[in-house]
Image (cartoon, coloured by chain):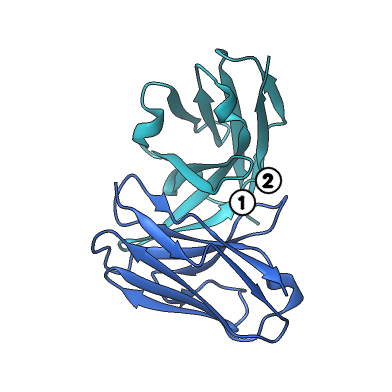
Amino acid sequence: QVQLVQSGAEVKEPGASVKVSCKASGYTFTNYYMDWVRLAPGQGLEWMGIINLNTGGASYAQTFQGRLTMTRDTSTSTVYMELSSLRSEDTAVYYCARETRIVSVALFDYWGQGTLVTVSS
Amino acid sequence: AIQMTQSPSSLSASVGDRVTITCRASQDIRNDLGWYQQIPGKAPKLLIYAASSLQSGVPSRFSASGSGTDFTLTISSLQPEDFATYYCLQDYTYPYTFGQGTKLEIK
Protein backbone atom coordinates (compact mmCIF):
# COMPACT_ATOMS: atom_id res chain seq x y z
CA GLN A 1 0.00 0.00 0.00
CA VAL A 2 1.12 3.54 -0.68
CA GLN A 3 2.66 5.27 2.32
CA LEU A 4 4.32 8.62 2.82
CA VAL A 5 6.14 8.87 6.13
CA GLN A 6 7.51 12.24 7.19
CA SER A 7 10.23 13.12 9.63
CA GLY A 8 9.49 14.30 13.13
CA ALA A 9 8.65 17.68 14.60
CA GLU A 10 11.27 20.41 14.58
CA VAL A 11 11.89 23.53 16.66
CA LYS A 12 14.05 26.16 15.02
CA GLU A 13 15.20 29.65 15.84
CA PRO A 14 14.42 32.55 13.51
CA GLY A 15 16.93 32.73 10.67
CA ALA A 16 17.69 29.02 10.76
CA SER A 17 16.85 26.39 8.14
CA VAL A 18 14.76 23.25 8.40
CA LYS A 19 14.84 20.12 6.25
CA VAL A 20 11.81 17.85 6.32
CA SER A 21 11.86 14.41 4.71
CA CYS A 22 9.08 12.35 3.18
CA LYS A 23 9.80 8.67 2.56
CA ALA A 24 7.58 6.99 -0.01
CA SER A 25 6.79 3.31 -0.34
CA GLY A 26 4.33 1.03 -2.09
CA TYR A 27 4.61 2.47 -5.60
CA THR A 28 7.11 3.29 -8.34
CA PHE A 29 8.66 6.44 -6.95
CA THR A 30 9.84 8.07 -10.17
CA ASN A 31 6.47 7.78 -11.93
CA TYR A 32 4.95 10.59 -9.89
CA TYR A 33 5.36 14.14 -8.63
CA MET A 34 5.45 15.28 -5.02
CA ASP A 35 3.95 18.49 -3.72
CA TRP A 36 4.43 20.24 -0.42
CA VAL A 37 1.59 22.01 1.35
CA ARG A 38 1.56 23.76 4.69
CA LEU A 39 -1.07 24.68 7.23
CA ALA A 40 -0.23 27.51 9.61
CA PRO A 41 -2.20 28.06 12.83
CA GLY A 42 -5.49 29.77 12.06
CA GLN A 43 -4.74 29.82 8.34
CA GLY A 44 -5.73 27.77 5.32
CA LEU A 45 -3.80 25.29 3.23
CA GLU A 46 -0.98 26.83 1.25
CA TRP A 47 0.68 25.20 -1.74
CA MET A 48 4.45 25.55 -1.58
CA GLY A 49 5.81 23.78 -4.61
CA ILE A 50 6.27 20.60 -6.61
CA ILE A 51 9.10 18.30 -7.61
CA ASN A 52 9.18 15.92 -10.55
CA LEU A 53 10.46 12.70 -8.98
CA ASN A 54 11.82 11.47 -12.32
CA THR A 55 13.85 14.50 -13.37
CA GLY A 56 14.27 16.30 -10.06
CA GLY A 57 12.99 19.51 -11.60
CA ALA A 58 11.02 21.70 -9.19
CA SER A 59 8.71 24.67 -9.25
CA TYR A 60 8.04 26.86 -6.23
CA ALA A 61 5.39 29.35 -5.22
CA GLN A 62 6.65 32.90 -5.57
CA THR A 63 6.13 33.41 -1.82
CA PHE A 64 9.02 31.06 -1.15
CA GLN A 65 11.35 31.91 -4.00
CA GLY A 66 14.94 31.95 -2.81
CA ARG A 67 14.12 30.22 0.50
CA LEU A 68 12.70 26.86 -0.60
CA THR A 69 14.50 23.88 -2.08
CA MET A 70 12.99 20.52 -2.92
CA THR A 71 15.17 17.54 -3.70
CA ARG A 72 14.76 13.81 -3.98
CA ASP A 73 16.86 10.70 -3.49
CA THR A 74 15.68 7.98 -5.83
CA SER A 75 17.83 5.33 -4.12
CA THR A 76 15.79 5.67 -0.91
CA SER A 77 12.51 6.99 -2.41
CA THR A 78 12.75 10.03 -0.20
CA VAL A 79 11.83 13.63 -0.92
CA TYR A 80 13.24 16.57 1.01
CA MET A 81 11.87 20.05 1.58
CA GLU A 82 14.30 22.63 2.93
CA LEU A 83 13.13 26.07 3.99
CA SER A 84 15.71 28.65 4.98
CA SER A 85 15.71 32.04 6.71
CA LEU A 86 12.88 30.88 8.92
CA ARG A 87 10.60 33.41 10.56
CA SER A 88 7.78 33.01 13.06
CA GLU A 89 5.21 33.04 10.24
CA ASP A 90 6.71 29.77 8.97
CA THR A 91 5.40 27.96 12.04
CA ALA A 92 3.08 25.39 10.49
CA VAL A 93 2.40 21.76 9.80
CA TYR A 94 4.11 20.77 6.56
CA TYR A 95 2.69 17.99 4.41
CA CYS A 96 4.04 16.11 1.44
CA ALA A 97 1.42 14.91 -1.03
CA ARG A 98 1.85 12.52 -3.93
CA GLU A 99 0.54 14.00 -7.14
CA THR A 100 -0.98 11.61 -9.65
CA ARG A 101 -1.60 12.91 -13.17
CA ILE A 102 -4.35 11.45 -15.32
CA VAL A 103 -3.95 13.09 -18.74
CA SER A 104 -4.10 16.78 -17.75
CA VAL A 105 -5.73 16.21 -14.38
CA ALA A 106 -3.69 16.35 -11.17
CA LEU A 107 -4.78 14.89 -7.87
CA PHE A 108 -3.11 14.75 -4.48
CA ASP A 109 -4.14 11.21 -3.66
CA TYR A 110 -1.80 10.29 -0.80
CA TRP A 111 -0.50 12.52 1.95
CA GLY A 112 2.15 12.27 4.62
CA GLN A 113 1.14 12.53 8.24
CA GLY A 114 2.48 16.07 8.56
CA THR A 115 5.51 17.58 10.29
CA LEU A 116 5.13 20.40 12.76
CA VAL A 117 7.81 23.05 12.40
CA THR A 118 7.89 25.63 15.16
CA VAL A 119 9.96 28.77 14.72
CA SER A 120 10.66 30.42 18.02
CA SER A 121 13.48 32.09 19.85
CA ALA B 1 -1.44 33.66 -9.68
CA ILE B 2 -5.00 32.39 -10.00
CA GLN B 3 -7.16 33.41 -7.05
CA MET B 4 -9.65 30.91 -5.69
CA THR B 5 -12.54 32.37 -3.71
CA GLN B 6 -14.61 30.03 -1.60
CA SER B 7 -17.94 30.76 0.00
CA PRO B 8 -19.12 30.66 2.63
CA SER B 9 -16.06 30.81 4.86
CA SER B 10 -18.03 29.03 7.57
CA LEU B 11 -21.28 27.16 7.72
CA SER B 12 -23.39 25.70 10.53
CA ALA B 13 -25.54 22.72 9.68
CA SER B 14 -27.18 19.69 11.25
CA VAL B 15 -26.76 15.99 10.64
CA GLY B 16 -28.89 15.06 7.66
CA ASP B 17 -28.75 18.51 6.07
CA ARG B 18 -27.75 19.13 2.47
CA VAL B 19 -24.99 21.68 2.09
CA THR B 20 -23.30 23.35 -0.85
CA ILE B 21 -19.94 25.09 -0.97
CA THR B 22 -18.86 27.20 -3.90
CA CYS B 23 -15.48 28.06 -5.34
CA ARG B 24 -14.80 30.71 -7.96
CA ALA B 25 -11.59 31.02 -9.94
CA SER B 26 -10.22 34.37 -11.09
CA GLN B 27 -9.80 32.97 -14.59
CA ASP B 28 -10.90 29.97 -16.64
CA ILE B 29 -9.36 26.77 -15.21
CA ARG B 30 -11.33 24.31 -17.37
CA ASN B 31 -12.15 21.46 -14.99
CA ASP B 32 -8.75 21.42 -13.25
CA LEU B 33 -10.13 21.57 -9.74
CA GLY B 34 -10.11 19.29 -6.72
CA TRP B 35 -11.88 19.32 -3.38
CA TYR B 36 -10.16 18.32 -0.15
CA GLN B 37 -11.40 17.69 3.36
CA GLN B 38 -9.31 18.53 6.39
CA ILE B 39 -10.09 17.30 9.86
CA PRO B 40 -8.03 18.97 12.61
CA GLY B 41 -4.90 17.00 13.38
CA LYS B 42 -5.18 14.87 10.24
CA ALA B 43 -3.79 15.17 6.74
CA PRO B 44 -6.07 16.56 4.04
CA LYS B 45 -8.08 14.00 2.13
CA LEU B 46 -8.94 14.07 -1.57
CA LEU B 47 -12.69 13.95 -2.20
CA ILE B 48 -13.15 15.08 -5.78
CA TYR B 49 -10.79 15.56 -8.74
CA ALA B 50 -11.31 16.97 -12.22
CA ALA B 51 -14.16 19.07 -10.82
CA SER B 52 -16.68 16.24 -10.61
CA SER B 53 -14.94 12.84 -10.33
CA LEU B 54 -15.40 11.09 -7.00
CA GLN B 55 -12.18 9.72 -5.57
CA SER B 56 -12.22 5.99 -4.88
CA GLY B 57 -13.54 5.19 -1.43
CA VAL B 58 -15.28 8.53 -0.90
CA PRO B 59 -18.97 8.19 0.02
CA SER B 60 -21.49 8.95 -2.72
CA ARG B 61 -23.15 11.66 -0.61
CA PHE B 62 -20.31 13.87 -1.86
CA SER B 63 -20.74 15.30 -5.34
CA ALA B 64 -19.37 18.22 -7.26
CA SER B 65 -19.84 20.09 -10.48
CA GLY B 66 -18.63 23.04 -12.48
CA SER B 67 -16.17 24.11 -15.12
CA GLY B 68 -14.47 27.30 -16.22
CA THR B 69 -14.65 29.60 -13.21
CA ASP B 70 -17.53 28.37 -11.05
CA PHE B 71 -17.56 25.16 -9.04
CA THR B 72 -19.65 23.59 -6.30
CA LEU B 73 -19.26 20.82 -3.77
CA THR B 74 -22.43 19.30 -2.33
CA ILE B 75 -22.88 16.96 0.60
CA SER B 76 -26.33 15.46 0.25
CA SER B 77 -26.94 14.29 3.83
CA LEU B 78 -24.42 15.41 6.42
CA GLN B 79 -22.94 12.76 8.67
CA PRO B 80 -21.13 13.46 11.96
CA GLU B 81 -17.74 12.65 10.38
CA ASP B 82 -18.28 15.34 7.68
CA PHE B 83 -17.79 18.27 10.04
CA ALA B 84 -14.44 19.55 8.85
CA THR B 85 -12.87 22.26 6.72
CA TYR B 86 -13.17 21.95 2.95
CA TYR B 87 -10.81 23.42 0.39
CA CYS B 88 -10.86 23.72 -3.34
CA LEU B 89 -7.55 23.55 -5.22
CA GLN B 90 -6.88 24.61 -8.78
CA ASP B 91 -4.30 22.47 -10.56
CA TYR B 92 -4.62 24.22 -13.93
CA THR B 93 -1.32 26.03 -13.66
CA TYR B 94 1.53 26.78 -11.27
CA PRO B 95 1.38 28.06 -8.67
CA TYR B 96 -1.45 25.76 -7.65
CA THR B 97 -3.74 27.69 -5.34
CA PHE B 98 -6.20 26.71 -2.64
CA GLY B 99 -9.38 28.48 -1.72
CA GLN B 100 -9.35 29.95 1.76
CA GLY B 101 -11.43 27.10 3.14
CA THR B 102 -14.98 26.53 4.38
CA LYS B 103 -15.35 25.41 7.97
CA LEU B 104 -18.40 23.22 8.38
CA GLU B 105 -19.64 23.18 11.96
CA ILE B 106 -22.38 21.37 13.80
CA LYS B 107 -25.46 23.50 14.50
Along the line of sight, the residue nearer the viewer: B15 or A78? B15
- Residue A3: x %, y % from top left: 65, 49
Residue B45: quadrant of the picture: bottom right
Instruction: Tell me the crowding category of disc 1: few under 14, some 14 to 19, or many 20 or more residues within 10 angstroms, Cα based.
Output: few
Chain identifier of the residue bearing label 2 in the image: A
Tell which circle, 2 or 1, labels the residue nearer the N-terminal end.
Answer: 1
Residue displayed at 39% across by 71% down: B51
Is A33 rendered above or below residue B103?
above
Instruction: Tell me the crowding category of disc 2: few under 14, some 14 to 19, or many 20 or more residues within 10 angstroms, Cα based.
Output: many
> Seen in the image, is B68 located left or right of residue A96?
left
Residue topped by disc 1: A26
Shade of chain B as shown in the rendered figure:
blue
Residue topped by disc 2: A113
- Residue A112: x %, y % from top left: 63, 46
What amino acid is found at the position of numbered circle 1 in the picture? Answer: Gly
> Seen in the image, is B40 located left or right of residue B56?
right
Shade of chain A as shown in the rendered figure:
cyan
In the rendered image, the residue lying farthest to the right is B80
Is A77 rendered above or below residue A113?
above
Residue displayed at 76% across by 75% down: B80
Which label belongs to residue B65?
none
Residue B84: quadrant of the picture: bottom right
> Seen in the image, is B26 located left or right of residue A84?
left
Is B68 rendered above or below residue A33?
below
Along the line of sight, the residue nearer the viewer: B25 or B41? B25
Of discs 2 and 1, which sits in the foreground?
2
